[in-house]
Image: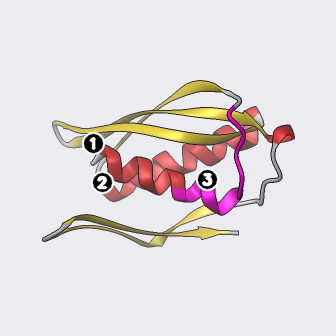
Amino acid sequence: MGEVFAAVAEGLTAAMCDSVPDTGDRFTVRVRAESLEALLFDYLDECIYERDVRGVLPVDHRATVWREGAEWAVEASARGVPLSAVTARDVKAVTYSEMDLAETEDGWRAYVVFDV
């Protein structure tokens, strides 16, 4: 599941920027939620928050997801490339109502729409 979360976060990065330099320091994100969909939404929202507040483009995502009682948790890290080092498009938010996270015969499939 961590690989799915990291891959979707990489999609968020790709929606914001075409080319990423090898600069930036890693930072950690921890999120808890009542469902996997809510966890994915909150995780991506936290990546957007980091961009807005710290002025960095989150790239090179790594994530670990687990269930703890009635809640789900993700601990993730990303490299924060300074926005001054890239030409980034503005992704405003994640559209929760159109999100789909489902297990298939071939593994997990995630569908996320970004509001630009």
Disc 1: CA contacts within 10 A as few (<14), some (14-19) or many (>=20): some
Where does the C terminus fall, quadrant-wise?
bottom right
- Residue 33, position in %: x, y? 35, 45
CA separation in Å, label 1 and label 2? 6 Å
Query: Which quadrant of the figure has residue 12?
Result: bottom right
Kind of element beneath mark 2: helix
- Under mark 3, the amino acid is Thr
Disc 3: CA contacts within 10 A as few (<14), some (14-19) or many (>=20): many
- Under mark 2, the amino acid is Leu
Is the C-beta separation of discs 1 and 2 under 8 Å?
yes
Q: Seen in the image, is 44 located left or right of residue 84? A: left
Kind of element beneath mark 3: helix
- Residue 95, position in %: x, y? 54, 68
Mark number for residue 72? Answer: 1
Please say if 8 is above or below 2: below
- Under mark 1, the amino acid is Trp
Range drawn in magenta: 11-22
Residue 24 belongs to magenta span: no
Residue 18 belongs to magenta span: yes
- Residue 84, position in %: x, y? 86, 39
Q: Residue at x 27, y 48 (%)?
A: 1
Query: Which quadrant of the figure has residue 18?
Result: bottom right
In front: 38, or 80? 80
Please say if 25 is above or below 115: above
Q: Seen in the image, is 91 located left or right of residue 62? A: right
For label 3, the residue is 13
Disc 2: CA contacts within 10 A as few (<14), some (14-19) or many (>=20): many
Kind of element beneath mark 1: strand
Please say if 105 is above or below 79: below
Say which of marks 1 and 3 sits in front. 3
Mark number for residue 36? Answer: 2
